[in-house]
Image: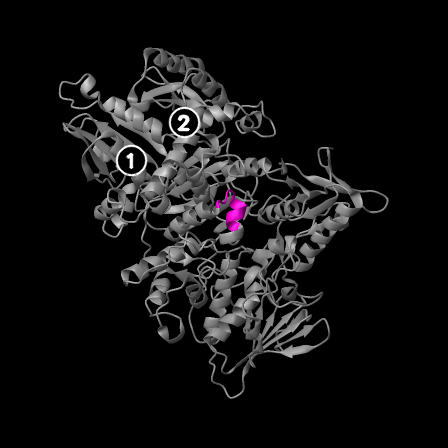
Amino acid sequence: MTGHPSSHPIQGAASAAPRRIVVAGGGPAAHRFADAMHARGLDGWHVTVLTEEAHLPYDRVALSKALTDSDVDLTLGSASMWDHAALNLKTGERVISIDAAGKMVRTAAGTVYPYDELVVATGSDAARLPIPGSELTHVYRTLEDVWSINKAIADLTGKLGRKVTAVTIGGGLLGLESAAGTEQLGATPIVINGSPWLMNTQLDEGAGQALGRLIEAKGFTVHGGVFPSEVLSDDDGQVTGVLMADGRIIDADIVIVAIGVRPRDELFRAGEGAEQQFQLGPRGGVVISDDCSTEVSGIWAIGEVANFGGMCLGLVAPANTMAEIVADRLHGGDATFPGFDTATKLKLSGVDVASFGDAFARTERALEIVYADPARGVYQKIVTTDDAKTLLGGIFVGDASPYTSLRPMLGRELAAEPGAYLTAAGGGDAPETELPDDAILCSCNNVSAGTIRDTVNGCGACDGNAPVQELGELKGCTRAGTSCGSCVPMLKKLLETELTKSGVEVSKALCEHIELSRQELFDAIRVLELTSFEEIMAKYGTGAGCDICKPTIANILASQNSAYVLDAGRGTLQDTNDRALANMQKDGTYSVVPRIAGGEITPKKLGVIAAVAEQYGLYTKITGGQRIDMFGARLEQLPEIWKVLVDAGFESGQAYGKSLRTVKSCVGSTWCRFGVQDSVAMAIALELRYRGLRSPHKLKMGVSGCARECAEARGKDVGVIATADGWNLYVGGNGGATPAHAQLLAKDLDDETLIKYIDRYFMYYIRTADRLQRTARWQEELDGGIKHVEDVVVHDTLGIAKDLEAAMAKHVDTYVDEWADTLKDPERLRRFRSFVNAPDQLDDSITFVSDERGQMRPATAEEKALAGQHPVLIGASIPVRATTPELSDENEV
């Protein structure tokens, strides 16, 4: 146990006169304590909360909303809770001293409040800069602080008649939230950060640099590894800039300091000449035991003012846990504080960032499995034990989709290889993982998966233990998902799983922002002819969207019209590979995959590919889809390479998209003595017809010229096998983690009927499948399976065949090669550079070596280390670290 043993007697709740609890402070921790007491029962208790602020307790996690919207209501919980006769909230009352011997507190107004139990939740203050001109700066801590920033930017914009330059000092969580808010208010955001990379407390260097590139691409300027020495102003006291320690001056109209917080522990510090009663941490905060008690009987501390294990942290999850522990102890329980959960997930100007567990791999012999695209700002890392089985932590920047499912698995064995959870590497969803009952699903409110299951099944916290079938009700009963919200996708998934087990039909809502299913949303967009993410969210969504609905909407828009996928604001919605029109590889380079329809290619075109590979030093490999892949292209080389290929008659093979990939074929009747139909000609016709077709997941086809099935057509989404009388059509096959054989849909078809049925099948799948659902799984889940497909596609029982055919005809008529389109537009070509602020600079972290087979390959971690490159590397795995450099535990300037 950290700290010291508790000296508190366990308090009952049945004494004749109510026992008096005074809470010093009115922030989130104080609110959570009052709420926890209210939930457990207030019989025998009277709780008085004294807060110096004029507001009801509000959500500091959501303070950024108040920065951009001064009218937003951040009040925590229901204001009606304070109407309870045993709960008394007094605003504008700041506690200034504790009389532990007399068991009373005194406020700045001179009022004395006696107590039987005192809970101190005074929180923390924003840290200030000890430099000249600091009195001219703003801080980012309270509602009044952000309202002041909002007003200052509005006033300065009117006064100056131009965009305001807003400098934020501090590149941690608070600093980046502040900078993002100033950008939303129309200012030009600049971040000054003492660490060489952003969010150095939560992110390693690779992740921090990736985050820096992403926000710089959005118009932020970041100065890292630098320190301010003075805030400059004119004779009228108007800020004009920040003088740096190296002599540079950074222009500024407003300066916001967000360099961390300092615990407000003055109540625990002895006055001059008095004996120190409370133990304080070396960096502040009152030391508590694992029951959240201080050294003085009857006095507890929770939230940011409490020092446990030598740490004070400004995170909501531990504050909530401490509040619950004290409420439990006062009701006779024996709950203990398990330590700080430092997990963090947030979105900064549309950029996802998440970190949890042993993110810096400080555990002895820890392994780091990393996937990074330094050019485009995607970084994913999982930390495991040295046998690569037990999850220790992780970091995600740019694509944080694995966080939700991995966070509850901390300290447990993974169900698959660690690399399978790096979605940016695999291009799909992470493996399905069923959470054990004791896994913590919501860390903010300490809610386990078992609690969720019990509540859904009628054994939990809701009134009368009635089963819960709605997400909102589940959140209300358990508090899961009501703080930061990062666990909501997993919460929704667990709810649906339990309801399905009970035979209850579940909602097919796309995500928490869009109540429609993918199919319903697809139809709505098609009928109303909506063409932008903003239009769709305004009509059918709430909030700013997430990593589920954004790429789904981008995919739907791309499948309904052949407009350039990165125009009209759709580029930021796309997955990583689509944004580069190329597949990102483990070392941050890209593959180049020209279309080779049906696997047929002339010697002349083969020579073009060979020449390109030689000129740019690319690794070449023939794929299972009968194409030639070229690996190792830098981002800025892609347009040059594709210009040569397009001029030679090639087009994009779209290996990067959720679209048609290849149509594999055997040589058929043209050459093979067993062939009964011309499979190559049919494969080419099909590939040229369906090229560029965007769908819920990738599509693969195969055409075999006889029953020997050399093209493996029955392992494809659509397989065509020749017969003496025509073609047999198979649908719904795929390889992957769960292989499925395609099923026979129709026999002995002529060419025209075959293509007509495939048109209908693909369009029906595109319109009705769920996001990221392969044809095999979609077909299995249809009521009636292959029989239903036959009814719709062959017999037209729904009467939509003509509509499906017309939609496919529109696609065929409007198809344009994406790379040819890109090369025509200089503005589109601007995307292809490693550094937006240094377009001519190459990414020097990319290194190749020659292998024993005569081709180049990415350098390994050891090879890069020997070459003297930086130890934070791009790759599928990082070797065991013997030591880890110490990092600061605060975002200091």
**Residue 152 vs residue 780: left or right?**
right
- Residue 203: give x, y in percent of width and height: 51, 42
Mark 1: secondary structure: helix
**Residue 536 vs residue 72: left or right?**
left
At 69% from the left and 66% from the top, the residue drawn is: 271
At 23% from the left and 51% from the top, the residue drawn is: 784
- Residue 725: give x, y in percent of width and height: 15, 29
Q: Quadrant of residue 556?
A: top left
Q: Which residue is mark 1?
A: 756
Q: Which residue is mark 2?
A: 862
Q: CA distance from mark 2 to mark 1?
A: 55 Å
Contact, mark 2 vs mark 1 (Cβ under 8 Å) = no
| Residue at the extreme bottom | 16
Q: The C terminus lies in which quarter of the figure? A: top right
242 and 336: which is toward the camera: 242
Q: Quadrant of residue 273?
A: bottom right
214 and 759: which is toward the camera: 759
Q: Which residues are magenta?
A: 529-537
At 56% from the left and 68% from the top, the residue drawn is: 31
Examine the rendered structure and indicate whether residue 141 appears above or below residue 459. Answer: above
Q: Nearer the viewer, mark 2 or mark 1?
A: 1
